[in-house]
Amino acid sequence: MTLDERGGRIERLLDLLREDDTDKFEGVVPFGPQEFTDPGIAAREREMIFGRVPSIVAHSAEIARPGAFLTLQMPRNKVIVVRQRDGGVKAFVNACRHRGALLEDQPSGQCRIFSCGYHRWSYDTDGSLRTVTYDHTFGEVDKSASGLIELPAEERHGFIWLVDNAAATIDVGSWLGPEMDTILASYSLDTLLTYQAEGFDEPVNWKVMQDAFLDGYHIKYAHPNTAGKIIHTNVLAVEDYGAHARFLSPRKSIDRFLEEDHGDADLGRHVTESHFLGPNSTLLRQPDHYQLLTFRPHPTDPGRSRMEMRVMVPDVEASGLDEAVWERRWAKNWQILLDVLHAEDFPLLRASQEALGSADAGGMLLGRNEVINQIFHRQVRALTADR
Ligand code: FES
Ligand SMILES: [Fe+2]
């Protein structure tokens, strides 16, 4: 992305701020609380969203070496993602083909083979069945047909993407579309390190969670002493790319440029640039690092979900910092993020889920100013519509 290109968007953001305005969606859209509690709707989302389109499951650096793996619960499948000997990535259903035991129980690690804890069948990291224990007594097994079930996975722009359906195919570039594909390519996220990645299982629907992290309307009300002090509320400059969107929000430090002429100065430090990567991630681009938030439905319960947060940073050498300074800086940054989540967002969202579960909660509204939420909900509706 050139400076000029972003400069133009920042000028537009300044105009919005001067006019106490924000980019807006075409209309107010009603919705019902059952969208966050109904088991039938949740089942449809698992099939028609996560079973059909790619979503991010990791930053590439989390499984850098051959044999490095991580496991996760997707909405439809338990999954192992593993780095191959040739440098590629494969994903498998984390279930043994003998009698279905959970093959790998660790959240992440390094291995040569996957070895089942139940009767010790083993699989190569490429998924092929290697050994059947006591095979002289077991009987005939067609090994080529009894490898791990593979899920479509692709590595692109420094992320690993997955379609949670063994019968599907994956094409991340076409899902991103030309605009977002170009934007992500320009960030060189594959050159960064994952400073930290952590998951949070919350008793909250995944859309309630994701909505909160796409929301520029709540900042000074829900975060009066943290983000609300730093970032303006209800001012977004948005580019709508259909399944994805990019949006800028002004930091309060930009206020002095409302009057003053800033010439050619780059005001990038005074904005937060965010990306909604449909269907379930938000990428924040900060001046010196990136933060990725991902939200996944629980496999059965509409009232539960998992949020994952990742912070990606330049390594010590690339950052030019002393190692101890580097570590302190990112440890502090991570702690601030955790504190806000646990003290401010999660309590509010858990209580929202309970309130939405009221039998007579009534119809609700998404405003024109809630434009990123509108784009997200438009996509959920489009993907889950009858075809
Ligand atoms: S279930 Fe895995 S070896 Fe038996
Ligand atoms: Fe929030």
Image (cartoon, rainbow, N blue to C red):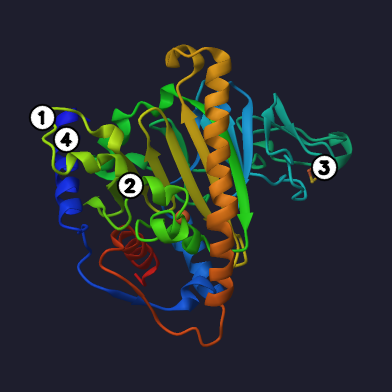
Q: How many marks?
A: 4
Q: Which residue is mark 3?
A: 139
Q: Residue 205: x percent and y percent?
A: 54, 64
Q: Which residue is mark 2?
A: 175
3D distance between C-alphas at marks 2 and 1: 38 Å
Q: Is residue 238 left or right of residue 55?
A: left
Q: Amino acid at mark 1?
A: Gly
Point out the tag, 2 or 4, that comes first from the N-terminus: 4
Mark 1 or mark 4, whichever is nearer to me: 1
Name the residue that disc number 4 marks: 7
CA distance separating discs 2 and 3: 45 Å
Q: Nearer the viewer, residue 21 or 5?
A: 21
- 284 up-or-down from 30: above or below: above
Q: Earlier in the sequence, mark 2 or mark 3?
A: 3
- Mark 1–mark 3 Cα distance, whole angstroms, equals 79 Å
Disc nearest the viewer among 2 and 1? 1
Residue at 69%, 47% in the rendered image: 95
Q: Are marks 4 and 3 in contact (CB under 8 Å)?
A: no
Amino acid type of the residue tagged 2 in the rendering: Trp
Foreground disc of the pair 1, 3: 1
Question: Which is in the foreground here, disc 2 or disc 3?
Answer: 2
Amino acid identity at mark 3:
Gly
Marking on residue 15: none
What is the distance, in whole Å, between disc 4 and disc 3 at their CAs? 69 Å
Residue beneath the point at 40% across and 56% down: 219
